Amino acid sequence: MPIVSTNIDAEAMLDDIEMVLQDGLNEALVVVYANLEARDQARAERRGIEYVPLTYADVPNDHYHVGNFPRQVLKDVPAELYPYIVLAVEDMVPDAESANQDHMSVFRQQLAVHSLANASEEEGSEVVYRRALRMGVAVHTVLMSNSVTSRMLSGVVNPARNQASIPWTYREGGRNENRAWYQAVGLSYAIKLYTSRFG
């Protein structure tokens, strides 16, 4: 029977990250929104508009999707499942290191964590953008403060990339029946994995 290397086990890594986020994401959202409340009030005053507190919804444990980039799963995720998180491994490439590691096989695995938020038609596209950004901040806070995931992400400058999608609405047959706004913010992390035939 072949020996299975657990060092490049993408499924186990995704499982660990999902559990960490499920345990800490909603608590982190409370902190993120509280930290930005004064800025929200100041912005409303500068713009000369009434201050309306920016609210958010918790991300339930069944609002996690593993394995696909968001644009490939949008039709599979109904509006009532927002907000939600997508976890995906984008690629794995060899990552040679110094000669003193020549007995090791080193790989760089690219992890993507996409935070998808929603807002009503009345709230508008700016609100959905801010909600998606804040979900991303909360995700990063959790991953970097947990001992398991922070160890995974150490040794490389992370996140390697932070990218926001354009906001969208759902359309069927050219008609927009759902006027709510949706948007994603994706964080990409580089994770180094080491394996050796010597055990």
Image (spheres, helix red, strand yellow):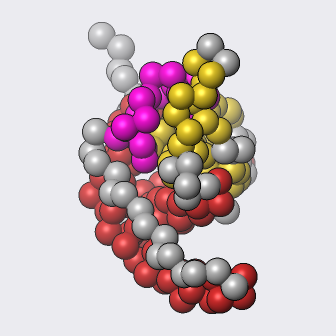
- Name the spot of residue 181 as percent of width and height, x first: 58, 45
Is residue 96 shown to the viewer in this render? yes
In the displayed structure image, the side of residue 122 where residue 146 appears, left or right: left
State the image coordinates of residue 89 (x, y, percent, origin top left): 55, 34
Dividing the picture into quarters, in which one does residue 69 lie? Answer: top right
Whether residue 196 appears in this view of the structure is no
Nearer to me, 26 or 143: 26
Decide which of 121, 30 is in the foreground and name it: 121
- Magenta residue span: 63-84
Quadrant in which the C terminus appears: top left
* Magenta span includes 78: yes
Q: Residue at x 33, y 62 (%)?
A: 26
Side of 132 relative to 7 (left or right):
right
Q: Which image quarter holds the N terminus?
A: top left
Q: In this view, which residue lies farthest toward the top?
A: 1
Residue 147 pos. (x, y %): 36, 65
Q: How many marks?
A: 0
Answer left or right for 64 relative to 181. left
Image point (36%, 45%), residue name? 18
Please identify the quarter of the rendering in which residue 123 is found: bottom right
Question: Which residue occupies the foreground of this view, 91 or 25?
Answer: 25
Residue 91, above or below 128 = above
Identify which residue is drawn at 54% across, 81% down. Answer: 51
In the displayed structure, would residue 173 be above or below residue 93? above
Q: Is residue 165 magenta?
A: no
